[in-house]
Image: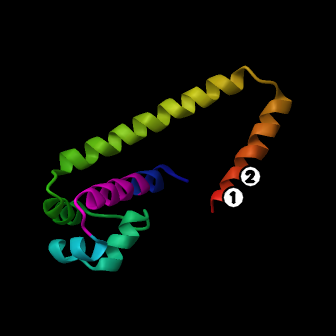
Amino acid sequence: MDENSKVRMIIGDRIRLIRNQKRLTQKGLAELAGINEKYISRLEHGEENVTLDTLMKITSPLGISLEELFRGVQQRQEEAGLLINQIISILQTRNEEDHKFILDLINLLLGWKR
């Protein structure tokens, strides 16, 4: 997954989280923002590139600023970076056989999650 896709996923997750906290449905948010409901769904799933104008339409009914939305995005990226560094630190203490086993385990878990 490229960096743009990651950012789209994080933005979509943030919008979904805040929308749920505000007890809004996708349809409700779409109506308040003047945007198509299917677009909201695709946005929340990281499938759409979004403009600042559209983000402003979305954040307004959510009662947050663009700064608040992106603050959460930056925080998620930093948390992901910390997790990756922790994983690397652990892997550096293991041998190649353990690395292969761990990789197989990760692939198994990711396949199961789908």
Local secondary structure at mark 1? helix
Give coordinates of residue 13: x percent, y percent.
38, 56
Q: Which residues are magenta?
A: 9-24
Q: How has the structure been colored for display?
A: rainbow
Tag 1 residue: 112
Q: Quadrant of residue 113?
A: bottom right
Tag 2 residue: 108
User: Does residue 20 belong to the magenta stretch?
Assistant: yes
Name the residue located 19 percent from the left edge and 51 percent from the top edge.
66
Label 1 Cα crowd, 10 Å radius (few <14 / some 14-19 / many 20+)? few
Q: 52 or 10: which is nearer to us?
A: 10
As displayed, is residue 36 above or below residue 9?
below
Name the residue located 22 percent from the left edge and 66 percent from the top edge.
54
Image quadrant occupied by the C terminus: bottom right
Q: Quadrant of residue 56?
A: bottom left
50 vs 64, left or right, is right
